[in-house]
Image (cartoon, grey):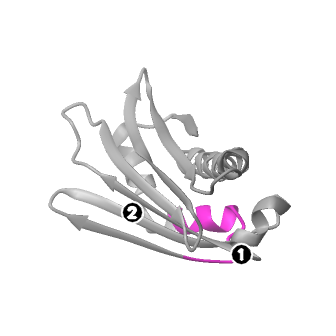
Amino acid sequence: MELKLSASYDATPEEVFAIVTDATFREQACQKTKALSYSVEVTESGGDTIVKVQREMPSDDVPDIARKFVGQTLTVVQTETWHPAKPDGSRDADVTGEISNTPVTLKGTASITASGAGTVQAIDLDVKVAVPLIGKKIEPFVVGAIRSGLQKEHELGRDWTH
C-alpha cells in the first residue's frame, strides 16, 4: 500500500538535511512518538549519510486481527540512505524498513527540495504486509501508524527550524 507524505519548512535544503541527519533530532522524534526504547545511528559511507533508527513501540493501536502477529510491542527499524547534495542543495534518499519479527516491510524514497523560499521534504513508501488473506486488511492500519509517526516527526522538524 502506498504512503505519500510531504512537509514544508521555512529553511534551506541544507538546513533541513542537517536536521533530519541529526541524532538528537531523531532521538527527540522517538520520544515524541512515545517509543518505549530506541537507538539512533548516523554514519557516513562513500559520500552517503545513513540514518538508522530502531524504536520499540507499544502495540496498543494494532487491531486485534494483527495483534497475534506482533505481541505487546513492535520493534520498528528504519534506514535512510541520503545521497550527496545536487548543485541546488536538494537530496534524495533510499528508505527501507521493517517491523522486526513480522511480515511488515517498507521501501521507498525520500527527498529534500527547495520550494520557493522554503524546502519540502517528501516521502513515498510502499508498505507491505505479507500475510495471505489478511495482509491487505492490515496494511491500512500499518500505513496509518507510519503516517502518524511521520507527521509528528515533521511537526518536530518545523519546531527545529524556528
State whether residue 58 is above or below residue 83: below
The three-letter code of the residue at mark 1 reads: Thr
Farthest left residue? 46
What separation in Å lies between label 2 and label 1 (alpha carbons)? 22 Å
State whether residue 87 is above or below residue 24: above
Q: Which residue is mark 2?
A: 51
Residue in the picture at 84% in, 62% down: 64
Q: Earlier in the sequence, mark 2 or mark 1?
A: 2
- Confirm whether the magenta stretch covers residue 2: no
Disc 2 crowd, CA 10 A, few/some/many (<14, 14-19, 20+)? many
- Residue 1 locus on image (x, y percent): 58, 40
- Residue 79 locus on image (x, y percent): 41, 61
State whether residue 95 is above or below residue 57: above
- Stretch in magenta: 26-38
Residue in the picture at 57% in, 56% down: 130
- Confirm whether the magenta stretch covers residue 27: yes
Residue 115, quarter of the rendered image: top left
Q: Which residue is mark 1?
A: 73
Residue 44, quarter of the rendered image: bottom left
Which quadrant of the rendered structure holds the C terminus?
top right
